[in-house]
């Protein structure tokens, strides 16, 4: 049996199991989704959001990309963010990275990876902002993992800078922003950053005086 054929069989078995446990499960999913959380995570196959948080379909709205980035020119991310914040009205946004992230590791090198170079540049900027701290760490593993944490913090801050989040803060005092890192070695998630809704950012240039009028 080929892998993709096994996936289809596993899907049928899963669906049957869900109906057996909860006959109304799929009927509820068809009619509404009201997740409380938007999850922005890494595309790494070892970090499946629902599995590591033990959440069910419908509980978290998920966007994933290489190295869990919040890039202000990424229309995919911005579309997901706007839908989650303005339509689904999520109350929390979590940026979750993971130790040993290959995207962040690649950004620490001077190798060329083709088109992904353009994506890695944003991570390289994070490295440039914190180069003295990162270069002061002797262990290559600890250096990488510290940059991963700093990258998560920077992406949470990037969320706070968006007009989408700033407008929501003005209108409904949500969502709260969280930065987490997942440890592949033991499966534990560690909080590394948090920004409460309506926080005035350290650099006032990113704040808007009239949040309700932002477009």
Image (cartoon, helix red, strand yellow):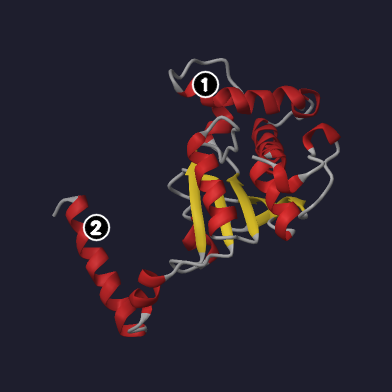
Q: Residue at x 82, y 41 (%)?
A: 209
Q: Which image quarter holds the N terminus?
A: bottom left
Q: Quadrant of residue 149?
A: top right
Q: Which image quarter holds the C terminus?
A: top right
* Numbered tag placed on residue 118 in the rendering: 1
Badge 1 element: helix
Q: Position of residue 19 (x, y in %)?
A: 30, 80
Q: Position of residue 95 (x, y in %)?
A: 62, 48
Q: CA distance from mark 2 to mark 1?
A: 34 Å
- Horizontal placement of 156 versus 81: left or right? right
- Horizontal placement of 68 versus 17: left or right? right
Q: Residue at x 58, y 45 (%)?
A: 98
Badge 2 element: helix
Q: Quadrant of residue 18?
A: bottom left
* Numbered tag placed on residue 7 in the rendering: 2
Of tags 2 and 1, the one toward the viewer is 1
In this picture, is 113 found above or below 88? above
In this picture, is 127 found above or below 80? above
Lower position in the chain sequence, tag 2 or tag 1: 2
Q: Position of residue 76 (x, y in %)?
A: 48, 39
Do we see residue 206 in this rendering? Answer: yes
């Amino acid at each position: 049996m080929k892998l993709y054929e096994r996936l289809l069989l596993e899907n049928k078995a899963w669906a049957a199991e869900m109906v057996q446990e909860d006959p109304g499960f799929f009927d509820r999913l068809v009619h509404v989704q009201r997740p409380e959380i938007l999850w922005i995570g890494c595309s790494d196959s070892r970090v499946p959001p629902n599995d590591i948080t033990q959440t069910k379909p419908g509980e978290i709205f998920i966007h994933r990309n290489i190295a869990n980035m919040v890039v202000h020119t990424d229309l995919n991310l911005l579309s997901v963010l706007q839908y989650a914040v303005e339509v689904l009205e999520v109350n929390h946004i979590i940026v979750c990275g993971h130790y040993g992230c290959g995207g962040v590791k690649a950004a620490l090198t001077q190798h060329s990876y083709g088109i992904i170079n353009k994506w890695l540049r944003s991570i390289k900027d994070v490295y440039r902002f914190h180069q003295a701290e990162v270069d002061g760490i002797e262990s290559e593993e600890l250096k990488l993992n510290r940059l991963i944490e700093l990258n998560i913090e920077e992406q949470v801050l990037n969320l706070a800078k968006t007009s989408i989040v700033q407008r929501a803060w003005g209108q409904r005092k949500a969502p709260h922003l969280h930065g987490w890192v997942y440890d592949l070695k033991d499966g534990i998630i560690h909080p590394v950053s948090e920004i409460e809704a309506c926080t005035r950012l350290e650099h006032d240039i990113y704040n808007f005086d009239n949040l309700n009028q932002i477009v």
